[in-house]
Image (cartoon, grey):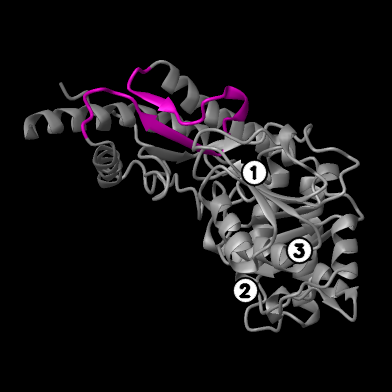
Amino acid sequence: MVSTTPDVRPSNPRFSSGPCAKPPQWSLDKLSDAPLGRSHRAAIGKSKLAAAIEETRALLGVPADYRIGIVPASDTGAVEMAMWSMLGARKATMVAWESFGAGWVSDVVKQLKIDAEVRTADYGQIVDMASLDYDTDVVFTWNGTTSGVRVPNGDAIPADREGLTICDATSAAFAQDLPWDKLDVTTFSWQKVMGGEAAHGMLILSPRAVERLESYTPAWPLPKIFRMTKGGKLIEGIFKGETINTPSMLCVEDYLVALAWGREVGGLEGLKARADANAQAVWDSCESRDWIANLAEDEATRSNTSVCLKFTDERITDGAAFAKAVAKRLEKEGVALDIGAYRDAPAGLRIWCGATVETADIEALLPWLDWAFHAEIEAQAEAA
């Protein structure tokens, strides 16, 4: 029998894993200070961009000697800049346990044709990070947005490594601890945990990464938007707000608003606590139901932002069709938007639990998952 329709609906049904929900109480009038129609090279533009960089540093606790740059093409652009500019100096180790990591593998092996060892794990698992050779350049994602798993800590990365670590941290930054001393290149985008607008990426470089840029020239030509050095020296302006291409000052203002909100809720610790509470509500719900489970098999590696779920009921005859139908029911009711699993991932649901989502909305959503599941089971039985 179909379960009773829940009485309470989420106030905000946006549970997309990117672009993610805006911060609570966000409104367009909060962007009124954006210097629209002005050059990003004007004093006001430079000051806004510099503020975005330094406030990012403060909120994330990035060391003072690390460079932070705003780059084009979101997290993808930031990762590509790092790989095309720095890889090739030594052997690489490419690590993938979800679709985006697999994309970085393809770029390095098929496009750059770099000597690389490829280490993979199935969705819901991660590679044994302690087994990697850190005298090679290691490229990996910290949090698998499409698989719901994360690196639990940086303990496996040695301090005396010879190679660089290049970390795609786009769904981890602002929600999980990132050990800066273990990360040489870190990338993320505004539209994930902070709910900013798309198309802008962040590139954070350790002194070791800067040394690589200044001492190594790749064998292949670099597009203009990838070039971070001139005459063998780092272009420092990039890391002071003098962006390679024209940024949207409206998006910059939106990011500054999100950073201010992050400070208001307790800084990094407050942001992590919000994501933890959201994810825990989903995990607890799964533990009390026998028809749904966390895709991440090890509790230690479960993501607190991109929580991926799989249906386990034996009555389900077509997992992909069933999951799509459940997501469609929830969207039609206006209680959950964009929560279907990523197209390359195993069939299921994906609930964004980052800090901009309110725990009350997660709690309101969970009874609707029951409702949609039982409704679809009944529909499947009737169709048979």
Of marks 3 and 1, the one in the foreground: 3
Q: Quadrant of the C terminus?
A: top left
SS type, badge 2: loop
Q: What residue type is labelled 2?
A: Ser
Give 276 or 87, whichever is nearer the viewer.
87
Q: Where 99 falls versus 72 (above or below)?
A: above
Mark-to-mark CA distance, 1 and 2: 24 Å
Q: Where 148 falls versus 111 (above or below)?
A: above
Quickly name the residue at label 3: 88
SS type, badge 1: loop
Q: Which amino acid does label 3 sit on?
A: Gly
Residue 252 is covered by the magenta coloring: no
Residue 32 visible? The answer is no
Q: What residue sits 63% from the left and 61% below the top?
A: 108
> Where is residue 242 shown, x and y percent of the image?
79, 76
**What range of the chain is rendered magenta?**
289-317
Q: Are marks 3 and 1 in contact (CB under 8 Å)?
A: no
Q: What residue sits 46% from the left and 36% below the top?
A: 308
Residue 300 is covered by the magenta coloring: yes
**First in residue order: circle 3 vs circle 1:** 3
Quickly name the residue at label 2: 248
Q: Are marks 3 and 2 in contact (CB under 8 Å)?
A: no
**First in residue order: circle 1 vs circle 2:** 1
| Other residues around mark 3 within 10 Å, as few (<14) / some (14–19) / many (≥20) | many
